[in-house]
Image (cartoon, helix red, strand yellow):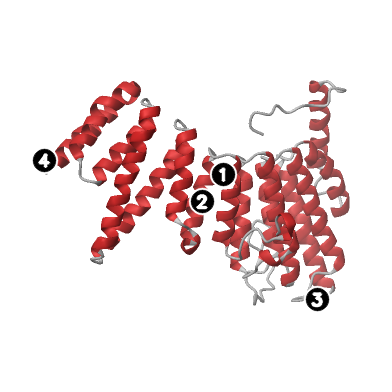
Amino acid sequence: MHGVRRTWNQTIDQAQRYEQWSAEARQVLQQRYALSRECFLKRSEPVLLRNPEEYSLWNRRKACLVESYRLELATASENAGLSPPPALREQVEAEFRVTEAALRQNPKSYATWAHRLWLLRAVLPLSPDSTSTAVPGLGNCQWRPPWIVPLDLAQVYLAREEALCKQLLALDDRNFLGWRHLVEVLTLTKGIGLDLSSSSSSCGEGGAPVAGAAAGKRLLHITRTVLDQNSCNYTAYHYRSIAVKEAPQDFDWLEELDALHQVMYTEPNDQSVWFYYQWCMEQLQQHRQLDQASHTQNQAHDHRHYLEKELDLLDALLELEPTARWALEAKARHLMNLGQHKEAARILGEELPMVDPLRKGMYEELADACMRNSLA
């Protein structure tokens, strides 16, 4: 976790502990093909819980699951296309429990997140009417088991994954692996046409659904919840920009900018909010160009008026924080969009080099470009 030092068991010396784990890991790795499936799964679990970054052990566990699927298909072929037998379902559940325990031990384990996503993709159907019964090779993570998991069970799996991601993000909201897994879960939800808001495990406080069925809408809700707790979360802003494209009808640009204004005043030197603010203004600029192309001059005029309001807000902020580099850069961009290139060149050529001398050359080049545009 960010800013949190990991603690070790002080009853065993660190070097002795490392040697003990290394010996166990080497032994299990050397015997991974000689041991039976049940024995290997049992012996590899404590090793992975100590250090979940051992890819070879996770890969062998994948092979054990595939072998179980193939054995079941060979001995009970009549079950193909139906629900998985209870024994195999329990084996999959056990694997989910192992990965969850490993993630709680190390929430940023690449190997564990990859294995859990592999599990999730394996047990879910491609679509509500998927009928694939093929069992491809071990190296392909896109394989499907020889049956179709019922949608109600798939809904349980996906709702549980979303809840786990939220728990881990509550502990560390900058865990980019957790964010990526959450987006994968929402993508799978959208792909098979499920509505997690109807599941009790995806409800917020008081039993109310946290968001709608669309993946983009749910991601908008989750990112807003995280940003309400930490307004400087770059990852949340990044995935919020992706969610907007998926659910534009559920996004209010003016409301979003109002929320950004509050963060800009409280954290004027945090780059994440200014990057996202620039992206929002660029999207509005694109809408303005579309409005002009379709001859909707009233909407284009409204956008120009809003740019002028943004300039007034930045001027007020700069009165309080005259050395706020990001606010000066944003003001220069707004002036350029309004056609006031000379004033933008003055800010870039005079004010910003004083505030940020390390980037003086960049500002001077931008100022020259503004002057050329003003003469064009």
Identify the residue position indicated by label 1 in the image.
227
Up-down: is 253 above or below 32?
below
Relative placement, left or right, of 325 versus 298 is right
CB under 8 Å between callouts 1 and 2? yes
Question: Neighbour class for label 4 at 10 Å: few (<14), some, many (≥20)?
Answer: few
- Give the spatial CA distance, label 3 vs label 4: 76 Å
Identify the residue position indicated by label 4 in the image.
375
- Give the spatial CA distance, label 2 vs label 3: 43 Å
Where disc 1 sits, the SS reads helix
Residue, x 79% and y 40% (percent of image)?
Answer: 49
- The residue under label 2 is which amino acid type? Arg
- Lower position in the chain sequence, tag 4 or tag 2: 2
Q: Position of residue 156 (x, y in %)?
A: 75, 63
Q: Quadrant of residue 336?
A: top left
Relative placement, left or right, of 156 versus 309 is right
Residue, x 76% and y 48% (percent of image)?
Answer: 99
Q: Position of residue 348 (x, y in %)?
A: 26, 31
Identify the residue position indicated by label 2 in the image.
240
Q: Position of residue 299 (x, y in %)?
A: 29, 61
Of circles 3 and 4, which is in front?
4
Where disc 4 sits, the SS reads helix
- The residue under label 4 is which amino acid type? Leu
Q: Quadrant of residue 22?
A: top right
Q: Can residue 324 be seen from the camera position used here?
A: no
Q: Can residue 9 be seen from the camera position used here?
A: yes
Residue, x 26% and y 65% (percent of image)?
Answer: 296
Foreground residue among 326 and 309: 309
Of circles 1 and 4, which is in front?
1
